[in-house]
Amino acid sequence: MMILPGKTLGMLGGGQLGRMFTMSARTMGYKVIVLDPADNCPAGEIANFHIKADYENKEALAELGHKCDAVTTEFENVPAETLRYLTAFTQVHPTASNVAIAQDRMLEKQFMKENGFPIGPYTNITSHSDILSALTSVGLPSVLKLCRLGYDGKGQTIIFNEAEAHNAFDSLGRKPCVMEKLLTLDAEVSVIVARTHNETEVYPVSENRHVNAILDMSIVPARIERKLAEEVRSIAVNITHKMNYQGVMGVEFFIVAGKPYVNEIAPRPHNSGHYTQDACITSQFEQQVRTLCSLPLGSSSLLTPVVMINLLGDLWSHGEPDWRKVFTHPQAKLHLYGKHTARPGRKMAHINCIGNSIKNALATAEEIKQTLSRNTSLANNF
């Protein structure tokens, strides 16, 4: 049954993804309640109501469930049990079982392997005794990754020998990990898929550049062969079908020797999909509202080439960046997240640079990046 404007939607998480969902939902005529433990969270400040509570607070969850016609989440690390608990009160998408797969690398790898999706060599590590055999089967160099709560390069260590593997496992608290072969990449790409119980929309492939394991820039459409792009899109769609998924999902891929390998999935809008706000008929956040409410999906068609650049807290090291340097570019669209504290590595904003070609969009993006970085560097000298 469709949930129409005027109803109330719930969002677990008050960060920038929750904020942009809230903005889309309110524009479409919905009320929004955000549950997040932080004061002054970005989404909570523009929602109709903010429940300040932990994600495992059952009294708060019951309040959210009773007041909302449907609930979703902005990130995969909300406990799956929280989503299960909420189903006693209201509709919840994505489901707890979907989120449980995405928030544990072992389960995610197992799901991909069992369903025949291409992944790189890996093995599970639960104790020091697993390491030697893992190195033999996976090879060196490799990457040791925490199974849970790792993101933007956190909880990951590159290893080149057995001693480093043991040290890395200790540094990660001897918690369950996966060891993955460090692949030589042609490119990193991703795809956003929106799906309801009877309809699917898939966005163009995004070519992603990372700096210090954090997304720095997304180029759309990706500069890869059309056949490869279609293969990547097909795999992403098939993953959502195998999971019987309802919602928006980001699927990351490594391209190695011209072949795609699934890196990981995100059961929510994805950083690399922010370009959709200004370059597609329907943004990933409007699509999240539509999937949650069982509305017909909007078109995912790309209207123009675009380059998205992430802005991290490093740019705020000496105060607010000089946004005049952005606004002098008429085809640059600034999206600030409303975060009150900037920290190095923290995502604070993004800019979508539109162009009549990838070359022009990329030139605008590079110029803005250099200008903002130069201003920060000059400030650091005083």
Image (spheres, helix red, strand yellow):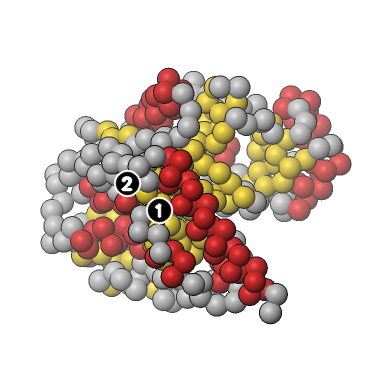
Q: Judge the density around disc 2: few (<14), some (14-19), many (≥20) Cα neighbours within 10 Å.
A: many
Instruction: Report the side of 7 relative to 214 (left or right).
Output: left
Say above or below: 162 vs 152. Answer: above
Q: Position of residue 352 (x, y in %)?
A: 40, 53
Direction bottom: furthest residue: 382
Q: Position of residue 169 (x, y in %)?
A: 75, 46
Q: Which residue is mark 1?
A: 352
Instruction: Please tell me which residue lies in front, 168 or 343.
Output: 343
Q: Secondary structure at mark 1?
A: strand
| Sequence-wise first label, 1 or 2 | 2
Q: Which residue is depicted at the point 69% across and 79% down?
A: 382
Instruction: Please tell me which residue lies in front, 211 or 147.
Output: 211
Q: Which residue is depicted at the point 27% across and 33% down?
A: 200
Q: Which residue is depicted at the point 43% across and 20% down?
A: 227
Q: Position of residue 250 (x, y in %)?
A: 42, 41
Q: Tell me if residue 229 can be seen.
A: yes
The amino acid type found where label 1 is placed reads Asn
Instruction: Report the side of 137 relative to 338 (left or right).
Output: right
Instruction: Report the side of 330 relative to 104 (left or right).
Output: left
Say above or below: 70 vs 94. Answer: below
The amino acid type found where label 2 is placed reads Ala
Q: Tell me if residue 113 can be seen.
A: no
Per the model, the C-alpha gap separating discs 1 and 2 is: 8 Å
Q: Which residue is mark 2?
A: 279
Q: Which residue is depicted at the point 81% across and 32% down?
A: 132
Q: Judge the density around disc 1: few (<14), some (14-19), many (≥20) Cα neighbours within 10 Å.
A: many
Direction right: furthest residue: 163
Do residues under tags 1 and 2 come within 8 Å of each other at their CB atoms?
yes
Instruction: Please tell me which residue lies in front, 212 or 61.
Output: 212
Q: Position of residue 245 (x, y in %)?
A: 34, 37
